[in-house]
Amino acid sequence: MFTINDLYNLEHTIAKDYLSQYTYPWKALKEIKSFILKTGSSLDNNYEEISENVWVHKTAKVFSSSYIGAPCIIGPESEVRHCAFIRGSALVGQNCVVGNSTELKNVILFDAVQVPHFNYVGDSILGHFAHMGAGSITSNVRSDKKLITIHNGEEKIETGLKKIGAMIGDYVEIGCNAVLNPGTIIGRNSIIYPTSCVRKVVPENSIYKVSGIIVKKEG
């Protein structure tokens, strides 16, 4: 339930071929920077290199108050709004919103992702039409700085990585002020209640409630 094919429809990202190399999404985090650099240099004339290794589609809207660090690709018709902070190694797909005071670092955002208000998204992959409510964040480093383990019930997967945020599937809704702890995985079409603190694999088509109870999503 937490492979790349379980979580994402790869037709909705220019990273399709890159991600297809991997079984598990967190394995793709290490080479996002290299992938963006390679891809950016081969983009067509619809993209402008507005600064070194920062490519923005001509139909995208980037507010002058935003900061975009390299390497970065901003896709067609996306918006990077007031005071957004893109630290680098960020692939932003088509029709995305990177909003007010949102920070991105080492991420892939599939098409139509919205991170519109005060979000931190680091070392994460967000699927098609994923949406993060205001103030929700991905926490990408353990407090004790140990390597991150994926928890799926009684099953534990040692990743060997110090930094993993969240792997968020297609059409996931993250409620306002939710915290997704390091190594959190949210299956497709699931909902996370506002103010939740999540530290596990949440199956697809589920609702994660504030108390940590997971119920099947109706309809």
Image: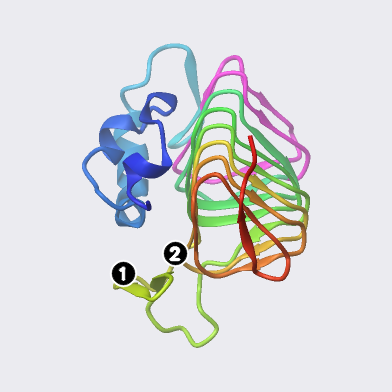
Q: Main secondary structure of the magenta part?
A: loop
Disc 2 is placed on an element classified as loop
Q: Which residue is mark 2?
A: 164
Which one is in front, 125 or 1?
1
Q: Quadrant of residue 79?
A: top right
Asked whether residue 65 is drawn in magenta, I would say: yes
Tell me whether the residue at label 2 lies in contact with that at label 1, contact meaning CB atoms closer than 8 angstroms. Answer: yes
Q: Picture coordinates of residue 61 (x, y %)?
A: 68, 23
CA neighbours of label 1 inside 10 A, class few (<14), some (14 to 19), many (20+): some
Q: Is residue 121 above or below residue 98?
A: below
Residue at the extreme top:
45
Q: Quadrant of residue 153?
A: bottom left
Which one is in front, 180 or 124?
180
Which residues lie in the magenta part? Answer: 56-83
> What quarter of the picture does the C terminus occupy?
top right
Marks 2 and 1, how far apart at CA: 9 Å
Q: In the drawing, what numbered circle is on residue 159?
A: 1
Disc 1 is placed on an element classified as loop
Q: Quadrant of residue 210?
A: bottom right
Q: Picture coordinates of residue 159 (x, y %)?
A: 31, 69
Residue 179 relative to residue 142: left or right: right
